[in-house]
Amino acid sequence: MRDEPTWRISVGLLGLLLALLVYGILIARYLPGLIGDWNALVQTAIYLFLGLIWLMPLRRFLIWMETGRWTVPPEKD
C-alpha cells in the first residue's frame, strides 16, 4: 500500500476530465443533427446508451491510476 499519491492519479484525473469533455462536446454537437427527427423513445435509448458506454474502459483506467498496470494485479497471500 502506498502512502502518497503518484503522478498517475493527477494525470489520470486530468485525462479523464479532458476525455469526457471532448466526448460530451462531440455527442452534443453531432448527434442531434443525426437523430433529431427520430422517435423520442429511440433518442432516449441512444442517449442513455452513450451516457453509459464511457464507463466500460473506466475500470482498467482506474486500475492503471492506482497500480501502474492495466490489469488487476495478482493477490498476495
Image: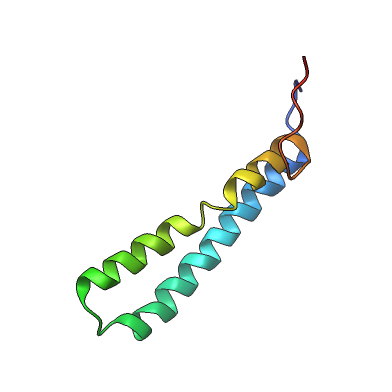
| Vertical side of 69 occupied by 21: above or below | below
Give me the residue at 44% from left, 72% from top.
27
Foreground of the two, 58 or 13: 58
Foreground of the two, 34 or 6: 34
**Residue 60 locus on image (x, y percent):** 65, 46
Give me the residue at 53% from left, 59% from top.
20
Give me the residue at 25% from left, 85% from top.
37
The quarter of the picture where residue 28 lies is bottom left
Q: How many marks?
A: 0
| Vertical side of 28 occupied by 13: above or below | above
Q: Please state if 2 lies on the left or on the right of 52 as rendered.
A: right
**Residue 12 locus on image (x, y percent):** 67, 47
Color theme of the render: rainbow
**Residue 59 locus on image (x, y percent):** 60, 44
**Residue 70 locus on image (x, y percent):** 74, 45
Give me the residue at 52% from left, 62% from top.
21
Residue extending farthest to the top is 77
| Vertical side of 9 occupied by 28: above or below | below
Foreground of the two, 16 or 70: 70
Quick one: quadrant of the C terminus? top right
Quick one: quadrant of the N terminus? top right
Q: Please state if 56 lies on the left or on the right of 71 as rendered.
A: left
The quarter of the picture where residue 64 lies is top right
Q: Please state if 64 lies on the left or on the right of 34 as rendered.
A: right
